[in-house]
Amino acid sequence: MTASVDLSVRLAGRAARLFSIDIEREQLEKLAEFAHLLDRWNQTSNLCSFGSREELFERHLLDSLAPAVFLRAASRIADVGSGAGLPGVPLAIVLSGVELTLIEAKQRRVSFLNEVVRRLGLVGVRVEESRAEASGVRAIDAAVGRGVRSDVIGAFAREALGPEGRLILMVKHGAKSLPPWGFEVVSRVRYQLDGGFDHEAVELRAKQRST
């Protein structure tokens, strides 16, 4: 665990520089524990791809913190197609007091997410075993998607977001993808991860209907 704690301290510095996030000691410990659980489960279940602990922290945990820039005022959030809990679990750790639903359809990943929520004591976080299009989540402030098809998360967001809700997409910078139908871009945060990975978090809102 010592190596994970050291890496989480480095992650805290990077998150402060890239996203202006101040991560407390208890949150760092939970991020390190999450990395430990993900590494252990990944040895028998293909939850996500990484070649080293350093890569896990940089390309997955740090990357997952980018949407926090847009979520400071949000209280009800959904991570759509949560997979290994990315970005939902890191966001739940650093955003105090939020209600966050991790939506995931694959049973093995759901089991992992439930174990993470239990082991980390993530109050306000629940796991919903469901496909996005079948989810009953409604009236949320934000929907977040990492590696989720834009048409899938767009359809979910149109049903689930409240009137002022926002859709946050995590994409590679320069990716030739249009906003989901019915949404328009509000703002973007561009950031570069170690290894030259150039990414963006994109904030969208529902287009205003013409009268």
Image (cartoon, rainbow, N blue to C red):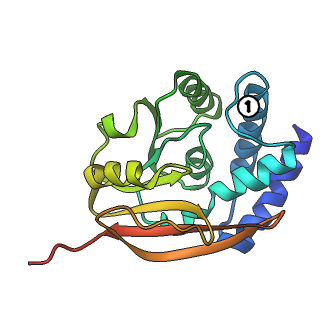
Q: Is residue 159 left or right of residue 116?
A: left
Q: Give x and y (percent) for residue 124.
A: 46, 40
Image quadrant in which you'd find residue 22? bottom right
Residue located at (29% from left, 37% from top): 136
Q: Which residue is mark 1?
A: 37
Which residue is at the front of the view, 145 or 182? Answer: 182
Residue located at (56% from left, 66% from top): 201
Secondary element at image label 1? helix
Relative to 111, residue 104 above or below: below
Q: Give x and y (percent) for residue 121.
A: 59, 34
Callout 1 crowding tier (Cα within 10 Å): few <14, some 14–19, many ≥20: some
Q: Residue furthest left?
A: 211
Q: How many discs mark residues in the rendered view?
A: 1
Image quadrant in which you'd find residue 200? bottom right
Relative to 146, residue 105 above or below: above
Q: Is residue 7 left or right of residue 166?
A: right
Q: Is residue 201 left or right of residue 191?
A: left
Q: Give x and y (percent) for residue 147.
A: 56, 50
Residue located at (52% from left, 27% from top): 106
Q: Is residue 101 left or right of residue 40?
A: left
Q: Quadrant of the C terminus?
A: bottom left
Relative to 170, residue 189 above or below: below
Q: Amino acid at mark 1?
A: Leu
Which residue is at the front of the view, 126 or 176? Answer: 176
Residue located at (63% from left, 70% from top): 173
Q: Give x and y (percent) for residue 24.
A: 70, 57
Q: Quadrant of the N terminus?
A: top right
